[in-house]
Image: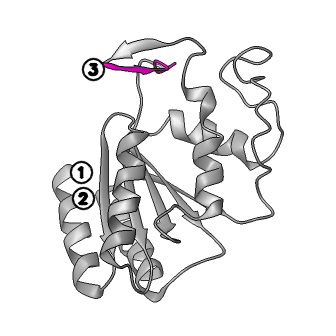
Amino acid sequence: MKVLIICDKDIKTDYSEALEKQLFELFLHKGFEIRIIQVGKQELKSCIGCFGCWIKTPGKCVIKDLIGEINRNYISSDTVIYLTPVIFGQYSSNIKNVIDRSQPYVLPFFKKINGTTKHPLRYEKNPKEIIIAYNDEIIEEEKNTFLDLINKHERQHRDIYFSLSKESNKEIVEKIKEYV
């Protein structure tokens, strides 16, 4: 099994760093192939909306930066985990940039999927996505805003967890153990 962990390099907490280590150890113990990619402000350019990933180089971003490595690892993984701080109910700008630049995973036309007009997925096999949100303190409104944001931009097979304490990290690891 291949696991890709995408982390915000610029904003971490003690709990997020501990969870990253616990997940790495869990997957290592299970014998999984693990790739951790730290994303900071300098590693990725912003999407320019050129649609080159649909027209010029289908399935690949035309901007040459870390996203090429992320996309290659993403599509060949069984599970992708995003570790993101929650900032005012949103992903961090670094993780949001990774998600914005995932346009190559979908096709350029629209299709009605479960009553909603969406872009269909490009690839037959797509990884399970797990989003783990963290911050030293997340108020209920921020949590609800974050969940609403993720649900509106739904992709398939997505689980969401909040890393806010040693206890919540333990619960997250136990839930992920059930999956793997």
Q: Earlier in the sequence, mark 2 or mark 3?
A: 3
Residue 32 visible in the displayed image? no
**In the picture provided, is 48 more to the left or to the right than 148?**
right
Image depth: mark 3 or mark 1 in front: 3
Identify the coloring: one colour
- Percent coordinates x, y for residue 3 in the rendering: 43, 49
Q: Look at mark 2 in the image and give the residue it sits on.
A: 176
Q: Residues within 10 Å of mark 3 (few under 14, many from 20)?
A: few
Q: Residue at x 74, y 24 (%)?
A: 51
Q: Look at mark 3 in the image and give the residue it sits on.
A: 114
Q: Quadrant of the N terminus?
A: top left
Q: Residue at x 32, y 70 (%)?
A: 162
Question: Which residue type does callout 3 highlight?
Answer: Asn
Is mark 2 in CB contact (under 8 Å) with mark 1? yes
Q: Earlier in the sequence, mark 3 or mark 1?
A: 3
Question: Which residue type does callout 1 highlight?
Answer: Val
Question: Which residue type does callout 2 highlight?
Answer: Ile
Q: Is residue 62 above or below residue 37?
A: above
Q: Look at mark 1 in the image and give the residue it sits on.
A: 180
Q: Residue at x 59, y 54 (%)?
A: 96
**In the picture provided, is 179 more to the left or to the right than 150?**
left
Nearest the viewer among 52 and 33 is 52
- Percent coordinates x, y for residue 19 in the rendering: 38, 75
Bounds of the magenta segment: 114-122
Residue 100 visible in the displayed image? yes
Image depth: mark 2 or mark 1 in front: 2
Q: Alpha-carbon distance for marks 3 and 1?
A: 28 Å
Q: Alpha-carbon distance for marks 2 and 1?
A: 6 Å
Outermost residue to the front: 141
